[in-house]
Image (tube, rainbow, N blue to C red):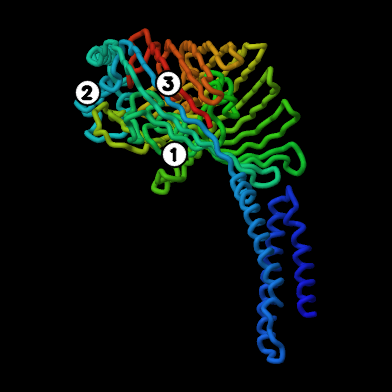
Amino acid sequence: MKKSRISLAVGAVVSALAVPVTVQGATVDELSAQLEAMQAQMSAMQSELKELREKDAARSQFEVVETDYGELQEEVMVLREDVDDLDERLMAPEKHAALDALTWGGDFRFQTHSISAQIPDHVNGLQFQGQFVSTLQQFGLLGDQFTFQELKDAAAFVQQNYPPELVGGMMEEFARNAYVPGYDFDDDILRTSRLRLEMNADVGENVNFYARLAMYKVWGDSTGVQVFNGQPTSINWDGTQATYPNSDDLIHVERAFFNWNHIAGTEAFLSIGRRPSTNGVPLNFREDEPRGGTPMGSLFNYQFDGITLGYKFNDYSTLRLCYGVGFESGWGNASQLKRPADRLDDAYFYGLVWDAWDTPSMYIHLIAAHAEDLTDGFPASTIMPYDPITGEALPPVPMRYEPSGTIGNMDLAGFVVTRRDGPFDYFVSYGWVESDPTKFTSPFGGMFTDPFDTPESQDGDMFYLGGRWNFNQDRTKIGLEYNKGSKYWYNFALSEDDFISPKTSTRGDVWEAYLTHRIRDRFIFKLAYIDYQYDYSGSGWLLGAPKKLDSTPVLGYPTYDEAQMWTLGLTARF
């Protein structure tokens, strides 16, 4: 009777538990619940079996027969096998669910470049200034140690108190002594590797996270800092650390942000973090990539930290209000040691970005932005080969560059229209900029102004157009692009992936032809040629007045008047 009661009880439990074990298509949570229940029941049954044995062993009037417990032991073993089976089934979906929380992708690109460039006849501005400083010291107008403001005051005194003929003749003599005939610059072969790692995660309902990490280096150089050569891309800015080959092999955070969508059940969304602000339309065409950044790429191609608040009107129209910080004035520059009057304000950006029409066949993008309290450069690292005040050679010591003053505000606006008609893609883009300078000038100048002049408001523009023919079932693409910038054209494009300099920053004409071919769907070959014809100096710079390059200008650092580059590359995307 006792054996019968135990068998019936165990059989009922096992029968009840055995049903969920055989259910197919259960979720991870359901399988977990089944496993926990079976483990609890098995533990209870093992305790009951132990208790029964102890009680029967204590009863001398009964002969304990081992077979009284055999069936119970057998049922426990069967249950254990079912638990092990369920545990094995559960491990795979649990592991998969854990990995699904974060998905990875990215690309690795190898490129080799061949660069040739021409530097025009010019006057070495640093040598010119060095002669001027030496003369002022000989006249007793400057001491051995002096500030840039004292140099400006001494120059103004000379201009006001010495005969113009004497000053003019002195300047002509300095220019003759500092004259540099034009010469060529070539780099026959330059190799780079770029690794980008992308990660995505669903944080919760209507909330997701995205990040991209990047390593971008020149073969044979991992120093992490460049010697300043006059080009804005020879400085490691905050906005280029992960998107331009800054000569190191470290992984940097290019972008990292969360998106909060459908706020309060509406089509409003919020995004905060390191912004997706590089390789926007239409620059993605030449790389055979989807749109890579939110703003128009020919106006903003620069990493920054910020916030976007947007609203999606429908499937093809989205409006965004963007805010970003370019310079944090109270951190890293020892501003606590400065008097309140000498401390700078933060530099920041805000603007409206409107995807007015976004369909597979046509895209229209409008942007208007304002840059507030811009400084004479953002925090950066470089090696200065010459003293910008005296022109004397400096030891090759890496330094943290810090802005020294606020040069003014800037307004920017533009649009881009892209179309796809059959196998042909094409686009038209236009950008405009206007400066609102302060009177501040540094040894490198003020906003669009030379160091010893008074800044004035200027405006510039750039148009950019291109087309791409797709054939061989879109595996092979041939494109041609052209852009032209005016004398005072400027854009925030330091992250643009062009070795010579950002082509969309050029004050002059640029032609580019390219071919891309998908050897495999995610293995891409590229051949490209780009030709720069510069009209004015200072492309990519806010500081200094543009100089006509065919007039033997005074240049602080040499600049190109012509440049050409061939590029050959392979990209593996994963």
Q: Position of residue 276 (x, y in %)?
A: 56, 33
Closest to the observer: 343 or 534? 534
User: N-terminal of the two: label 3 or label 1?
Assistant: 1
Q: As displayed, is residue 232 above or below residue 199?
A: above
> Hey, which quadrant is residue 217 in on the image?
top left
Outermost residue, top direction?
A: 550
Report x, y in % for residue 308.
63, 36
Quarter occupied by residue 467 = top right
Separation of residues labelled 3 and 1 (CA atoms): 23 Å
Query: Of the residues tagged 3 and 1, which is closer to the observer?
Result: 1
| Residue 309 located left or right of residue 396 | right
Q: Badge 3: how crowded within 10 Å, few (<14), some, or many (20+)?
A: many
Residue topped by disc 2: 135
Of all residues, the one furthest to the left in this rendering is 138
Helix, strand or loop at disc 2?
A: helix
**Residue tagged 3:** 501
Q: Amino acid at mark 1?
A: Ile
**Type of amino acid at the residue the image marks with label 2:** Thr
The residue sitting at 35% across, 13% down in the picture is 117
Q: Residues within 10 Å of mark 2 (few under 14, many from 20)?
A: some
